[in-house]
Structures are given as structure tokens and as C-alpha cells.
Amino acid sequence: MRTNSSLIKGLGILELIIKEGSVRIVDVARAFDMPTSNISLFMNSLVSSGYIFKNDMDGRYHLSSKLINMINQADDLNYRYIFEVAMPEMQKLFEKFRENTLIAVLDEMVTRYIGRIQSDHIIQIINAEEEVFPPHVTANGKAILANLSQKELNRYLDRMDNTPFTENSIVEPDILKKELAVVRERGYSINAGEFEPHIMAVGAPLFHGGEVIASLVVQFPDFRHSRSDLEGYAEIIMAASTRITALFN
């Protein structure tokens, strides 16, 4: 298969900027083991195309609003696809538990739900459509955080707000790291009133190409379910997430 090496290099530079947030020419030159003069041509071409811009104050290059809008549109399409693929398994979980069954994604420092089946109980947990959540105190977020690369996880831990939401919140980075290691090992996460009192949840990661892309979550109010119930529920939810993942790969 014939390829265009310059195009591949340019796309690699965009990936680096997306990953790092912003870069200097020397950073890119070091990453690709190329002279800064050659890298300047790539950066100028990307600026000219409107995909990145240079901040003249510090000489760093950032993604442009044009590219961010393109990425957001692609994300929306991808999220709809994830939800559509997951829906049959979500429906089975809903029929079993009759509780909120959701798909969540990580969006920088927060998680948000991109799909849901709402509980039909008279008393139910209500999440606003645009509501976002701190990942480290939610089952949906911990299932994702636990499966990030070490670099991505450290970046989150360095920036997270460690103000506790309840007495059960885990906000110390070292303790949280241990908690996430357990989550990664066993394949599911549990939130027992860490974000809001009386609301529990179980989450399991969804993968594509070996990378975590979302989490499958079921919420359980503690007046209908006990903390000890969650371990048994987790096996069922994790099995559903495994079947959904198989459809992506």
C-alpha cells in the first residue's frame, strides 16, 4: 500500500498537539527526531490550513477552533454509534434492575452521559441532560480513569479538585491511585455515596482498539439496594460491558 509520508507526519503532529494541549517547535522536533527547520514547514502548513494557531506571546502552537469544531462533530457521531451498539445490552440490564442504565465518556476533567435508559420507578435518580461529573468520585469516571495510560492518569490527578463531596469521597491522589488499581484489576468500579449521599453505582469500561472509550453504568439508590448487593450486580454489568466491547473490536 502506497502512503504519503508527509501527510502521515502532519497527522502525527496534530495528534501530538491534541495529546499535549500545546507545543513548541522544539518539542515537536524532539518528538519526531527532525531538525526544527523541517518542523517549521509542517507547522506553517498547518497554520495556513487553519488547523492550528501560534500564540506569539509564548511561541506555543494550539489547536484552532476550526479543528476543535470538527473534532466535536466527529465525537457526536462517535457517541451516537457507541450508544446504538450498547443499547441491546443496556436494555437487558434495565429489564433486570429497572434502574438508570447509562453510557458515560470522559471529557477532559469531567464525565458526561451520552446515552441513558431512565428508571421507571416512581422515585428515581434524575440526571440533567447536560450535567457533568467529577470522574474520581463516580463509578462512571473511575471505570475510565482506571484504564487510562499512566501519563493521562497523572495529568488528571495533577489537575483534579480534591475537595470532598461527601464523607465517602476519595480525594487523596495516593489513595485514589490504589483504588483505581483495584478497579483496573477486577474490571469494574463502585461508587457508594462518594458524589451524592444515598446514590450508589456500578461502572465497567468499554474498549476499542485496546483503549478505553466509555463506561457502562447502572445507578442504585440505597433505599432500594444495599451496598453488599453491588458486588453481585458488578459481575452482571461487567459481563455486559465485555459483550459490548466485543462488538467494537
Image (spheres, helix red, strand yellow):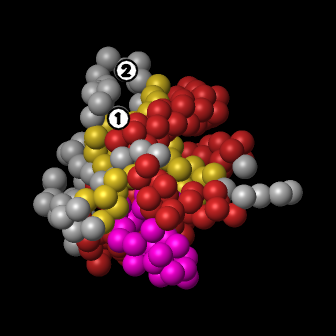
Q: Where is residue 225 in the image (x, y as percent from the top left)?
A: 37, 40
Q: Looking at numbered disc 2 in the image, what kind of residue is underneath it?
A: His
Q: Position of residue 61 (x, y in %)?
A: 34, 61
> Looking at the image, which residue is at 21% across and 45% down?
196
Q: Is mark 2 on a helix, strand or loop?
A: loop
Q: Nearer the viewer, residue 137 or 81?
A: 81
210 left or right of 174? right
Q: Badge 1 local density, few (<14 within 10 Å), some, or many (20+)?
A: few
Q: Name the residue under label 2.
A: 121
Q: Name the residue under label 1.
A: 224
Is 18 a magenta residue?
A: yes
**Residue 185, located in which quarter of the rendered image?**
bottom right
Q: State which tag comes first along the sequence, 2 or 1.
A: 2
Q: Looking at numbered disc 1 in the image, what kind of residue is underneath it?
A: Arg
Q: Position of residue 183 (x, y in %)?
A: 47, 65
113 left or right of 172? right
Q: Is residue 90 above or below residue 216?
A: above
Q: What element carries label 1?
A: loop
> Tag on residue 88?
none
Q: Residue furthest right?
A: 1
Q: Nearer the viewer, residue 238 or 34?
A: 34
Q: Position of residue 178 (x, y in %)?
A: 38, 75
> Looking at the image, which residue is at 54% across and 31% down?
77
Determine the CA span between mark 2 and mark 1: 10 Å
Disc tally is 2
In magenta, the rendered stretch is 15-40
Can residue 168 be seen here? The reply is: yes
Is 247 a magenta residue?
A: no
> Looking at the image, which residue is at 41% across and 24% down?
119
Could you tell me if the residues under marks 2 and 1 are in contact, i.e. CB atoms within 8 Å? yes
